[in-house]
Image (cartoon, rainbow, N blue to C red):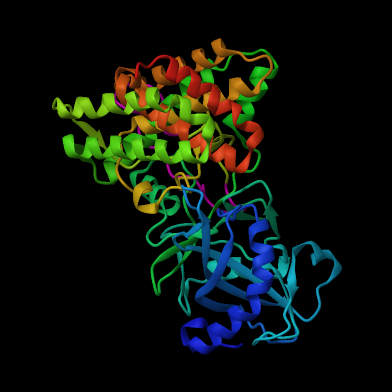
């Protein structure tokens, strides 16, 4: 193999995937970012294959794949299995004659046939030489086969030679840190269209909001469909996320209300900037009923996946019904672009970062809001809080994640996060969570102009929907955590009448 996939014949694609398939059947389901765990893999097909470094040379090669995966799941009736829509994944295959000992943990397998017969393939992101190659591609915008590398206008030049290291904490994506100055987020399960984790930080940068790291560079696939594949941003070294800070406060018996109030202000600043930069819409009865119908559908699907939800379902449905009823009575809501998966772990506190010899890598702060409740630049007790990970909930379709929604959805996510923190601490401290929830809403009102708790029915519906989502996520990925969202389900259901 010596050419990009855009010039390869279908026969070459078939031969390559046929040789890789036995190895991928074993390797892919074991990866933490693989979304189809527990469902049989029935086949693969290549969307594209691009040689970032020749794979047939004497040294290490790097092969970039966009791979469609076919799977099945057991039908709801329990009789047989039904096919699922294909998922598309981004893979980085290192290719060598022999694998050195330090790369042994990244082994995928040895190829006995096909265009790479006799070679060893492995997870290329763990090879420092290949990981550096990705950064070099991002430093020099341009096209390579179906891939396109771009940079943000006006961003500081990215220095070369930065040592890469992978982060192991993520589940749905992969990240490489370069020299503790930049972080490259690589989307694993990809969807056609702009990824919000690039789209929204760019919008905030254009609005002058200083609450998100500015994307420095990114790369996409332009054919056969547009995909956002990776985003390079400043790495906020030395920062701590609000989840860690909250758990520390709990462990030390300290209040977290001042921080919660600041987080509310930060959230409102981000919402205000997104509403200024991107289109907003008004939700009338049809859209509100559609919103409620989506919540109904997710609850029904969740009850199938997590039987423990079934007894609660009739009461939980009334939370969604209340929103639909308001729409039928003529109530409308403003909808805008939102974070989509906001929680304590998505907000970092720390000093603003700069690359050596360069200017700030965070957008210039916006002026103080008309309410006087804190500035985007981190003056006063707000500190240097930065919002990250605008991708939204990865399990939900990209079209849904990019859809304008009421801002209270993000508020509901943060309120659930305070409850999560309190529930993970022993003994459980419900008063701590309630004080944080109140302070957060008060801080939001200082900048946003209205307390989110005034939207009683909508906020309750979004909290319920979020808890249902959490139950499914925990059941699939972290069963030991399932009691945390189930406790919220029990609390929310107790306040509702079927």
Instruction: Please give left or right for residue 131 compared with residue 312 in the image.
Output: right
* Image quarter (top left, top right, bottom left or bottom right) of the C terminus: top left
- Compared with 216, 426 (above or below) is above
Residue at horizontal 40 percent and vertical 74 percent from the top = 223
Instruction: Please give left or right for residue 392 compared with residue 418 in the image.
Output: left
* Image quarter (top left, top right, bottom left or bottom right) of the N terminus: bottom right
Residue 222: give x, y in percent of width and height.
40, 71
Instruction: Please give left or right for residue 163 compared with residue 330 in the image.
Output: right
Instruction: Please give left or right for residue 295 compared with residue 61 in the image.
Output: left
- Compared with 258, 57 (above or below) is below
Asked whether 294 or 342 is in front, the reply is 294
> Which quadrant of the structure image shows residue 244?
top right
Residue 341: tell me if it is visible.
Answer: no
Residue at horizontal 50 percent and vertical 14 percent from the top = 434
Residue at horizontal 31 percent and vertical 46 percent from the top = 403
Which range of residues does the magenta coloring cover?
354-378
Residue 108: give x, y in percent of width and height.
72, 68
């Amino acid at each position: 193999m010596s050419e990009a996939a855009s010039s390869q014949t279908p026969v070459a694609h078939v031969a390559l995937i046929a040789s890789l398939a036995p190895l991928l059947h074993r390797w892919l389901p074991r990866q933490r970012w693989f979304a189809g765990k527990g469902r049989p893999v029935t086949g693969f097909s290549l969307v594209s294959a691009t040689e970032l470094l020749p794979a047939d040379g004497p040294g290490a090669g790097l092969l970039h794949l966009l791979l469609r995966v076919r799977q099945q799941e057991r039908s709801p009736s329990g009789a047989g299995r039904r096919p699922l829509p294909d998922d598309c994944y981004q893979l980085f295959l290192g290719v060598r004659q022999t694998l050195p000992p330090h790369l042994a943990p990244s082994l995928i397998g040895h190829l006995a046939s096909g265009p790479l017969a006799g070679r060893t393939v492995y997870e290329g992101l763990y090879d420092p030489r290949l990981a550096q190659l990705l950064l070099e591609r991002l430093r020099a915008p341009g096209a390579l086969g179906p891939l396109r590398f771009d940079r943000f206008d006006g961003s500081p030049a990215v220095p070369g030679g930065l040592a890469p290291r992978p982060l192991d904490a993520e589940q749905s994506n992969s990240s490489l840190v370069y020299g503790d100055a930049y972080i490259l987020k690589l989307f694993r399960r990809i969807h056609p269209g702009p990824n919000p984790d690039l789209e929204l930080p760019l919008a905030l940068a254009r609005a002058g909001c200083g609450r998100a790291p500015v994307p420095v560079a990114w790369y996409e696939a332009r054919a056969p469909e547009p995909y956002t594949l990776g985003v390079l941003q400043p790495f906020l070294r030395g920062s701590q996320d609000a989840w860690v800070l909250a758990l520390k406060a709990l462990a030390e018996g300290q209040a977290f209300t001042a921080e919660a109030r600041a987080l509310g202000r930060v959230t409102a600043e981000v919402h205000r900037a997104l509403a200024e930069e991107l289109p907003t819409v008004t939700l009338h009865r049809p859209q509100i009923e559609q919103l409620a119908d989506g919540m109904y559908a997710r609850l029904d699907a969740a009850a199938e996946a997590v039987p423990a939800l079934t007894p609660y379902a009739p009461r939980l449905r009334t939370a969604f019904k209340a929103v639909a009823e308001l729409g039928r009575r003529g109530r409308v809501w403003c909808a805008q672009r939102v974070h989509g998966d906001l929680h304590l772990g998505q907000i970092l506190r720390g000093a603003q970062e700069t690359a050596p010899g360069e200017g700030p890598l965070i957008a210039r702060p916006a002026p103080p809001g008309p309410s006087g409740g804190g500035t985007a630049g981190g003056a006063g007790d707000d500190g240097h809080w930065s919002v990250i990970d605008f991708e939204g909930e990865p399990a939900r379709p990209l079209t849904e994640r990019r859809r304008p929604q009421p801002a209270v959805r993000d508020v509901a996510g943060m309120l659930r996060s305070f409850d999560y923190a309190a529930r993970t601490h022993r003994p459980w401290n419900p008063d701590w969570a309630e004080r944080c929830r109140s302070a957060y809403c008060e801080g939001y009102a200082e900048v946003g102009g209205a307390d989110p708790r005034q939207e009683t029915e909508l906020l309750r519906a979004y909290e319920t929907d979020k808890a249902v989502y959490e139950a499914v996520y925990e059941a699939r990925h972290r069963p030991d955590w399932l009691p945390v969202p189930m406790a919220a389900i029990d609390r929310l259901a107790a306040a509702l009448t079927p």
